[in-house]
Image (spheres, rainbow, N blue to C red):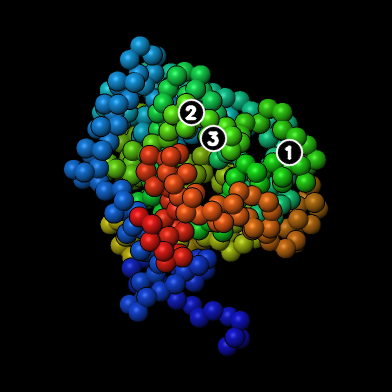
């Protein structure tokens, strides 16, 4: 064997393997990523403790919402998590949410209809924030040219910026987020890290423009909205019982909601990023992380997860059609895409970002970031476990 090749290993508890950056194994073959999940579960308990925590948040939301039109904001994509979150917020907890959808021109028709069906049935107000599509094109083209794995990072930045902007306008302190580490796990930073400093640099470098309307949060904006305005984002599914499959079945039976076929496939560019760009160009299969998390939390057996991994993460013919659609919609020729495709892959450390600052002042950052988030950010837990440090 070539000395540069790593011996293949796979975690004995989940299905994390040596394709995952920074993975290590103990004497029993248990990976540090399994221990990362254990730590997240310890810090975000479900059951009676989690329910009490969430009930307290609900009480605070209702108290803070007195005299206002809404108690909270929920970002909606037409996907399982945000659709089900609207249901429990309205029907189970009696909240008055405002649903906010970011329209960047890439939502599938199924997703658009899902949003309409659920908000209408639940009588929830919906606000759609439409981004100028010429800027969307430039931003996404720049990220493809950057050769980073997570080319949909700017959408993550835009969603957060819009939710906090509308929360501030409405005087709302609570933004509810449908993400759930028990179903999705924690992706390695090497695969999905993004921040505003990096985004602005990449757009200027590869498209030569300054953003005029595309929403994003600068570091100053973040400090102002979270520390001064005291707007925070909360993740209810980290504390109360939730599983995607039963939630999907419920939404379909009660609201005529439709499934779109895969994790984040409700948005066509996100689907392209996860199902084509990352696995084909980088060899990244994000299912390793999500299925492992579901094994650790008892939603799947390890054998079921391994069986799923025997099949490709996408239908080859469908993804080729999606690729052609994406290139046409971005005004990117096949020749230009092929040239980019053959360039060397890059990672977040190849471009300026806030990460070096975060790394240099990690202990200080811990204190600082705790002010931003009501519960420990997963990136801090990842850092703690992968560096074998102890901060929580």
Local crowd size for mark 2, using a 10 Å CA cut-off: few (<14), some (14–19), many (≥20): few
Give the foreground label among 3 and 2: 2
Image vertical order of residue 280 relative to residue 11, above or below: above
Report if the CB atoms under discs 3 and 2 are less than 8 Å apart: no
Q: Kindly tell me whether residue 82 is visible in this rendering.
A: no
Closer to viewer: mark 3 or mark 1? 3
On the image, numbered disc 3 is attached to which residue?
222
In this view, the residue in front, 321 or 266, is: 266
Circle 3 residues within 10 Å: few <14, some 14–19, many ≥20: some
Q: Would residue 126 be visible to someone looking at this image?
A: yes
Q: Which of the pair 23/182 is nearer the observer?
A: 23
Q: Position of residue 53 (x, y in %)?
A: 26, 38
Asked if the residues shown at circle 3 and circle 1 are in contact, with their CB atoms under 8 angstroms apart, the answer is no
Residue 360: image quadrant is bottom right
Q: Which residue is mark 2?
A: 228
Q: Which mark is residue 138?
A: 1
Q: Quadrant of residue 222?
A: top right
Q: Residue at x 35, y 11 (%)?
A: 67
């Amino acid at each position: 064997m070539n000395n540069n090749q790593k011996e293949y290993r796979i975690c004995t508890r989940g299905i994390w393997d040596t394709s995952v950056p920074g993975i290590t194994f103990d004497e029993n073959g248990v990976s540090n990523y399994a221990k990362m999940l254990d730590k997240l579960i310890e810090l975000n308990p479900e059951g009676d403790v989690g329910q009490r925590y969430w009930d307290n948040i609900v009480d605070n939301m209702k108290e803070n919402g007195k005299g206002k039109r809404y108690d909270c904001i929920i970002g909606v994509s037409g996907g399982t998590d945000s659709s089900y979150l609207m249901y429990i917020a309205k029907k189970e907890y009696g909240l008055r949410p405002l649903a906010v959808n970011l329209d960047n021109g890439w939502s599938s028709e199924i997703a658009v209809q899902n949003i309409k069906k659920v908000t209408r049935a639940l009588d929830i107000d919906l606000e759609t924030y439409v981004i100028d599509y010429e800027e969307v094109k430039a931003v996404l083209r720049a990220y493809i040219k950057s050769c980073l794995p997570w080319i949909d990072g700017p959408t993550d930045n835009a969603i957060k910026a819009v939710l906090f902007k509308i929360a501030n306008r409405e005087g709302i302190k609570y933004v509810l987020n449908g993400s759930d580490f028990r179903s999705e796990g924690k992706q390695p930073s090497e695969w999905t890290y993004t921040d505003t400093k990096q985004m602005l640099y990449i757009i200027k470098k590869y498209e030569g423009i300054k953003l005029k309307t595309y929403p994003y949060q600068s570091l100053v904006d973040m400090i102002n909205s979270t520390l001064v305005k005291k707007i925070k984002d909360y993740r209810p599914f980290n504390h109360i019982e939730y599983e995607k499959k039963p939630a999907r079945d419920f939404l379909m039976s009660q609201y005529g909601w439709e499934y779109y076929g895969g994790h984040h496939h409700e948005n066509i560019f996100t689907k392209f990023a996860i199902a084509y760009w990352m696995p084909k160009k980088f060899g990244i299969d994000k299912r390793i992380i999500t299925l492992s998390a579901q094994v650790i939390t008892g939603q799947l057996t390890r054998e079921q997860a391994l069986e799923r991994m025997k099949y490709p993460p996408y239908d080859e013919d469908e993804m080729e059609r999606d690729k052609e659609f994406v290139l046409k919609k971005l005004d990117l020729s096949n020749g230009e895409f092929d040239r980019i495709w053959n360039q060397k892959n890059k990672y977040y450390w190849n471009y300026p970002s806030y990460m070096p600052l975060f790394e240099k002042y990690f202990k200080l950052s811990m204190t600082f970031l705790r002010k931003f988030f009501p519960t420990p950010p997963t990136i801090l837990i990842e850092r703690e476990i992968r560096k074998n440090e102890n901060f929580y």
